[in-house]
Image (spheres, coloured by chain):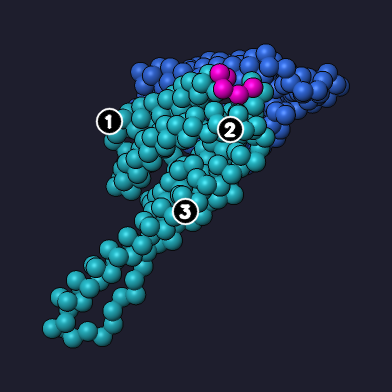
Chain colours: A blue, B cyan
Amino acid sequence: MKSLPILALIGTVMFSTAALAQTASDTNVEILKQKIKADKKMIISQNMDLTNTEAEQFWPIYDSYQKDLEGINQRIVHTIKDYANTVNKGPIPADAAKKLVNEALAEEEDEVKMKRAYFEKLQNVMPTTKVARYIQMETKIRSLLRREMAEQIPVIY
Amino acid sequence: MKTMGLGVIAVSFVVMMQGCASSQSKGQPATAAPPQGYSSAQHEKAALDDMNRAKTARAGADKNLEILMQKVKADKKLLVANNMDLTDAESRKFWPIYDAYQQDLQQINQRLGSTIVEYAEAYNSGPLQESKAQKLMNQALDAEEAEVRLKQSYAEKLEGAIPERKVARYIQIENKIRAAVYGVLAEQIPLAY
């Protein structure tokens, strides 16, 4: 796949959003986010070899998927912020720990379900092999993002 | 067309089988030196010897993989133990649940492993068939979903056994390890064409 290194930036951006949300960097983060969004679209477009007919049907579904994913991203960022706030106050209370685990697992579950729903939706408009390739790319991108998060978020003590 | 090498599959397997990032290793291809200078009368025997040698070498590689997998398993347990700070009473409750979880995860790993092997075979033998793409994608999504559900069920089980904060920490450690594994898989498995 072409130009994957760029995607490491997605993680950075999600973190920046969490860490810098209350600062003047908001505008910069927003610009960076827009750039990454465009880069992702370009990588996918370069790897999909869509015919014109396929493209007409694919891109609206892609856009709605990205919007849904953005919803999950926001939930993840919210969970991370909550976690950061709680951890900074001292030992984490049991109910807060439980809430964080439940939220993180629910987000993960929703993301898998969403992926399946879009896999099925896309099969109506283009060959399954291309749908599979697209889902592979989403999976690659999300896996790298999750690895980035896993590396950066400290464990609870 | 690029082929998806056995090395990739071996690495994928090893990292999946309980892998953590520090334990990655490249699969060593099993090779026996080809015999040289045989007369024609010896050819048949030489070919047989070759086959046996290759078989032995492959069995050796399987055994090495098995040893590596056991080591990775032990490393993971140690990593978890070092980070959990369990009291004796907590330990007694935690480790049986941990072992059961690892066994269930192992089954998911096997499902993922056979999906990767099936994909490699299809990938290496030409353009991916529609029905194959459908089947493989469903298998991959099923495994992913099963893993999340499994994690949820073990988080609940652990909540009854150790403090919530330690449950959260353990789930974080599992997430870190799995994220490293999935990161490797994402990097190594080629796109379907």
Picture mark count: 3
Chain of the residue displaying label 2: B
Residue B170 occupies quadrant: top right
| Residue bounds of the magenta highlight | B159-163
N-terminal of the pair, mark 1 or mark 2, is 2
Q: The C terminus of chain A appears in which quarter of the rendering? A: top right
Disc on res. B91: 2
Is disc 2 on the same chain as disc 1?
A: yes
Measured Cα–Cα span from mark 1 to mark 2: 48 Å
Residue drawn at x 31%, y 30% as measured from the top left: B135
Image coordinates of residue B147 in percent, x first then y, are 46, 27
Residue B161 drawn in magenta = yes
Is label 1 or label 2 in front? 2
Work out whether disc 1 and disc 3 sit on a shared chain. Answer: yes
The x and y percentages for residue A100 are: 65, 18
| B51 lies left or right of B137 | left
In the displayed structure, B80 sits above or below B156; it is below
Label 1, residues with CA under 10 Å away: few <14, some 14-19, many ≥20 = few
The chain holding disc 1 is B
Q: Earlier in the sequence, mark 3 or mark 2?
A: 3
Give the amino acid at mark 1: Ser
- Identity of the amino acid at label 2? Ser
- Residue sitting at 71 percent across and 32 percent down? A154
Q: Tell me the SS state at disc 1.
A: helix
Query: Is B133 a magenta residue?
Result: no
As measured in the structure, the alpha-carbon distance from the residue carrying label 3 to the one carrying label 2 is 26 Å
Q: Give the labeled residue for mark 3.
A: B68
Q: Nearer the viewer, residue A84 or A51?
A: A84
Residue that numbered label 1 is attached to: B131
Furthest toward the front, the residue is: B89
